[in-house]
Image: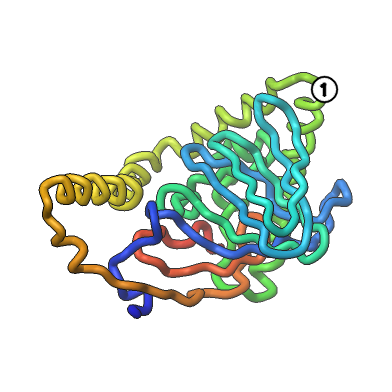
C-alpha cells in the first residue's frame, strides 16, 4: 500500500475529490447554505453520505429544488447555477470533473451585475484570506451573502419566465474567466486527457499481447490534507492528490 500524495497515480478519470458540510449560516431569504455559483467547463457531482438538505439549481429549464438524503447522487453540467442548502447534518462527497478544475477558478459566483462587470472588484469579493480562522470565516460569509444577493433576482426572473438575467450572468461569467482558458487547457491535458490516453495505450497494449503495465500494479491511500476549510458551499475537507489542482481563492 502506497500512501498519497507521494504517488503519481491520480484518482480514476483524474477527478477531484473533497468532503463538504454546507454552511449553517442563514441568508437574506432565511435559507441556510452556501454561495450560489456556476462552472463553465466542468460537471460536478454530489454523493450524499449523511443528513439531509437540498441543492437549488438554475438552468434553461428553470429553477429546481433537488432534495438530498443519504444515497442520493446529484450532478449538474456546465452553466448550471447551484446553491447548496443545509437541512440537518448534510454531509456530501464532491466529485469534480477535470482534475478538480473548479478549484482552479472554473467557478463564478452569482454576485450582483455591477460586481461581475469589474474584474478587480469581483476578485476582491471572491478571494478569501488564507487559513481557517475568524477572519476567513467572516470573509466567506460576506462572499456567500453577496452571491445570494445576486442570485435571488436571477431566480425570481427565471421563475417568472424571464431567462434574460440568467443568460446575461452566464455571459458575464464567461468574460471573467476567458483569460484563464490557456492555463485550464494545460491542467486538462495533464489530468483528464492524459488519463484517457493512458487507457487507450493500455488497450493497444492488450490487443498486442503486451502486459507490461500490469507489472506496475499498486494500491494507494490518502488522508485529508486539510480539514474544515471554507469552500464555496460550506466547510470542506480536501486532499492533496496527484493531478488535482490546488485550492481556489484561499478556500
Query: Which of the 4 quarters of the picture holds residue 163?
Result: top right
Q: Residues within 10 Å of mark 1 (few under 14, many from 20)?
A: few
Task: Classify 57 as above or below 224.
Answer: above
User: Quarter of the image holding residue 151?
Assistant: top right
- Viewer-closest of 48 and 30: 48
According to the picture, the residue beneath numbered tag 1 turns out to be 160
In the displayed structure image, the side of residue 63 where residue 29 appears, left or right: right
Relative to 25, say whether 1 is above or below. Answer: below
Q: Nearer the viewer, residue 58 or 193?
A: 193
Left or right for 60, reference 89: left
In the image, residue 97 sits, relative to residue 211, either above or below, namely above
**Quadrant (top left/top right/bottom left/bottom right) for the N terminus:** bottom left
How many numbered circles does the render carry? Answer: 1
Rendered view: 54 above or below 129: above
Q: Measuring from the top left, give residue 56's x and y in whole percent.
A: 74, 42
Quadrant in which the C terminus is drawn? bottom right
Residue 141, horizontal then vertical, whole percent: 72, 60
Return the x and y of residue 79 as percentages of the image width and height.
57, 34
Please name the residue shown 78% across and 38% down the image: 152
Secondary structure under tag 1 reads: loop
What's the residue at 34%, 73% (across, down)? 219
Q: State the residue at coordinates (66%, 71%).
A: 135
Residue 69 at x, y percent in the picture: 75, 55
At 61% across and 66% down in the image, what residue appears? Answer: 236
Structure colour scheme: rainbow
Which residue in the rendered view is the most extreme toward the right? 30
Amino acid at each position: 500500500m502506497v500512501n498519497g500524495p507521494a504517488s503519481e497515480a491520480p484518482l480514476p478519470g483524474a477527478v477531484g475529490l473533497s468532503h463538504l458540510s454546507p454552511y449553517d449560516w442563514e441568508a437574506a431569504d432565511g435559507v441556510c447554505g452556501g454561495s450560489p455559483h456556476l462552472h463553465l467547463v466542468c460537471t460536478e457531482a454530489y454523493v450524499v453520505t449523511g443528513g439531509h438538505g437540498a441543492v437549488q439549481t438554475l438552468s434553461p429549464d428553470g429553477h429546481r429544488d433537488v432534495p438530498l438524503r443519504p444515497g442520493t447522487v446529484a450532478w449538474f453540467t456546465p452553466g448550471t447555477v447551484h446553491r447548496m442548502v443545509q437541512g440537518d447534518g448534510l454531509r456530501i462527497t464532491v466529485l469534480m470533473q477535470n482534475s478538480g478544475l473548479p478549484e482552479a477558478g472554473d467557478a463564478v459566483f452569482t454576485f450582483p451585475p455591477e460586481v461581475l462587470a469589474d474584474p478587480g472588484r469581483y476578485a476582491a469579493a471572491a478571494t478569501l484570506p488564507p487559513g481557517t480562522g475568524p477572519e476567513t470565516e467572516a470573509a466567506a460569509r460576506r462572499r456567500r451573502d453577496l452571491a445570494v444577493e445576486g442570485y435571488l433576482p436571477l431566480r425570481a426572473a427565471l421563475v417568472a419566465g424571464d431567462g434574460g438575467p440568467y443568460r446575461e450572468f452566464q455571459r458575464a461569467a464567461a468574460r471573467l474567466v476567458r483569460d484563464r482558458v490557456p492555463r485550464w487547457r494545460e491542467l486538462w491535458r495533464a489530468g483528464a486527457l492524459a488519463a484517457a490516453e493512458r487507457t487507450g495505450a493500455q488497450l493497444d497494449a492488450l490487443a498486442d499481447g503486451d502486459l507490461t503495465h500490469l507489472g506496475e500494479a499498486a494500491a494507494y491511500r490518502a488522508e485529508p490534507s486539510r480539514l474544515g476549510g471554507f469552500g464555496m458551499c460550506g466547510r470542506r475537507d480536501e486532499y492533496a492528490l496527484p493531478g488535482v489542482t490546488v485550492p481556489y481563492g484561499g478556500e
